Image (tube, grey):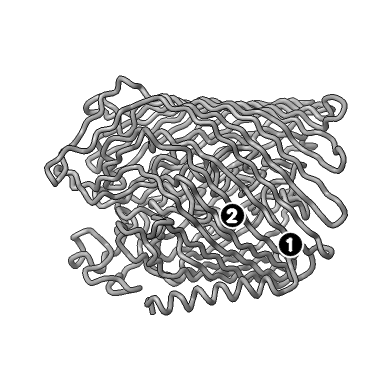
Amino acid sequence: MHSSHHFFTRSKAIALLVCALFVGNTFAQAESPSLEITATGAQEATQSILTPTKILQGDELLNKLGSTLGATLANELGVSATGYGAGSSRPVIRGLEGSRVQILQNGLSVGDVSNISQDHAVGNNMQNAHQVEILRGAAALLYGSGSSGGLVNVVNDRILTNLPDRPTGAVNSSYETVNTGRAGALELDSAFGAVAVHVDTAINNANNYRIPGNSTQSQGEPVGGWTVPPSGNGGNNYSGKLPYSSSNQNNLGVGVSHIGQSGYTGVSVERLNNNYGIPTPEGGYIQQSQNRYDLQHQTRDPFDGFSSFKFSAANSDYSHTEFTNAGVAASQWKNIANEARFELAHNPLAGWKGIVGAQVSAASLNATELSTGSYAIVPPTKTNSSAFFWIEEGKWHSLQGNLGLRYNNVAQKPNLGTELTSEVMSIGNSTPSISLQNRSFNLFSYSAGGLWNYSPGQGAGIAYTVSQRAPSAQELYSYGAHESTATFDIGNPNLNKETSHNLEFNLQKTSGLIRAKASAYANRFNNYIYGFYTGDAITSSGFNVVTAQQASATIKGIEGELTYNWNQTGLASRAFADASQGTFDAGGNLPLQPAPRLGVELAHQKNGWLSNATYIYSYQQNRLASWEQGPAPSYNLLNAGISYTQRVREVNWTVYMNLKNLLNEQIRYATTPMAVRLYAPQPGRSLMIGLRGTF
């Protein structure tokens, strides 16, 4: 079943499905947000090549909502996720993650350290999210350089831009069986004269989750089992609750805005706490907290020729403490981030409308080993960035076009006096030394796209994006043991900037009962930065020595989706497929690449009832980097849900039931580092019941 022959057969099946989508005389490009909405909320623009590739909102978002951003987006087209238990999961877009997929909150950086390591949770709470947007191409250049995978923007509408004419809000509570998870959320909006007020709070407490029981020889599992712990029949049939997979989150957010005839000015504050386990063989947990302050201002028609002036700024004070399985505080991470940006949108000029703006940010990262007082993994580093961007979109009869430009300067300044501590390797030598130095990078990114609407609601598009990324602090300066990945990470202070050349072809049909979209892309990297497993190990811990290296690499992929009557009353269906393959130009596979997938969804909506079922088949991932153990097994994921909504006086009440992983399959994402993938599968079969009210 898992032979290379069958892998290619199924790859052909994916290709045939995508080709069928192409042949259906269909399609139009969906690449990033419309200039009319940018990435701060509102509705999805129609037939704009600058529309977000995906907007999750409404019932669809509520049905897919997970405790983490990665879990929420894990089954979107072209999007997979990392799987560090229930507490920490980031989206992986087209085989790219970490610093290549920026996470925004209301259009500004989330300000956490989740891009440094997969065990670091994203610093936002999904319970109060109104909308999640995935952006690529020109729109990504509005917000950052180097997001070669894309950008994910989480919108919570904490700063209201319109006055509510009456108090509105929502309440939600749920219980989940797999982890005895209990969640509750409350949200209120109101107005006092010209002042709008928003309050939201959420609690999500989940114990260790249950994993599928019988793992022996399933899904191509090798003799001895995938699961590492010695308990439970010599490592086989390890079942029950997965240690250190619990998660406890809570947050409180308040926003106040003054809304006038020509615009609004608002501020918000948020406190977020997240305590979660790290399900490695050793185990441990992280206590995370963040205070965030936001300011937003918009003036409509500020002066002749311009339709909007927007200014936004955020300060986030992030910290987390990492504990051993004995409850000893091992290290503390702090990141203080400040960011500000303005956007000026001009009125149409010779058929073009556009946005010009600037953005500055400063972050200070400190990670300390509490037992010694020395640095943890990365020396203290200050990162400063300044950027200018310009995006244009034009339309001429059946043709549309877009252009995006961004210049960014990024300066990385480590504490040059930090004494780096070497370790003895099993071969008897000390770990290779590095020399800290300040670095500055000038980044030029640009995007051009075109769309031909060859008939109403149908079009063909092409987009070319060059995106440059500065090496991150951990890629440049890491020098230390990393328990959650069982590695000793060594950075390279001489790394060059990474450049991505992405060419994409799109077809799409956006009207009628049957709609479809498909895309094929090739993403070529110069100086792709990756962690290379040297084959050496630290004598005392056995951790693998991993060094930051660069090489030419290419990721190629196809995606397709076919829908019937989707998100409408009555019966609806959706079929989709995605596949990508990342390789080094010199030979070998990129690490942590997602497996190809096929999926189908059915939904029925009538008289307050909404029911849905989703089936996804993920292929075995045997195209692994030379140092990765595998293969990552294939899996069948079956989810289903049903809900009923009834209006009682002024409140719309919805009672819902969601079934997840109905087949109780052992699911291990190929995008998760070996230390966790080989040990900790995703949750087993689960039932969630809940009650939601909106007024």
- Expressed as whole percent of the image width and height from the top left, the position of residue 160 reads 71, 34
State which quadrant residue 505 falls in: bottom right
Q: Residues within 10 Å of mark 1 (few under 14, many from 20)?
A: many
In the image, what residue occupies the spot 82% across and 41% down? 352
Q: Is residue 192 visible?
A: no
In-front residue for pair 132/27 = 27
Residue occupying the far front of the picture = 586
Q: Residues within 10 Å of mark 2 (few under 14, many from 20)?
A: some
CA separation, marks 1 and 2? Answer: 43 Å
Q: Amino acid at mark 2?
A: Leu
In-front residue for pair 434/421 = 434
In-front residue for pair 148/207 = 148
State which quadrant residue 117 falls in: top left
Q: Does residue 105 lie above or below 587 as drawn?
A: above
Residue occupying the far left of the picture = 428
In the picture, measured across the screen, residue 232 lies left or right of residue 291, that is left
Q: Amino acid at mark 1?
A: Ala
In the image, what residue occupies the spot 18% across and 36% down? 423
In the image, what residue occupies the spot 36% across and 33% down? 493
- Single out the mark in the foreground, 1 or 2: 1
Q: Does residue 516 lie above or below 141 as drawn?
A: below
Q: Does residue 101 lie above or below 14 as drawn?
A: above
The kind of secondary structure element at disc 1 is strand
Query: Which label sits on residue 460?
Result: 1
**Precedes in sequence: disc 1 or disc 2:** 1
- Expressed as whole percent of the image width and height from the top left, the position of residue 135 reads 62, 48
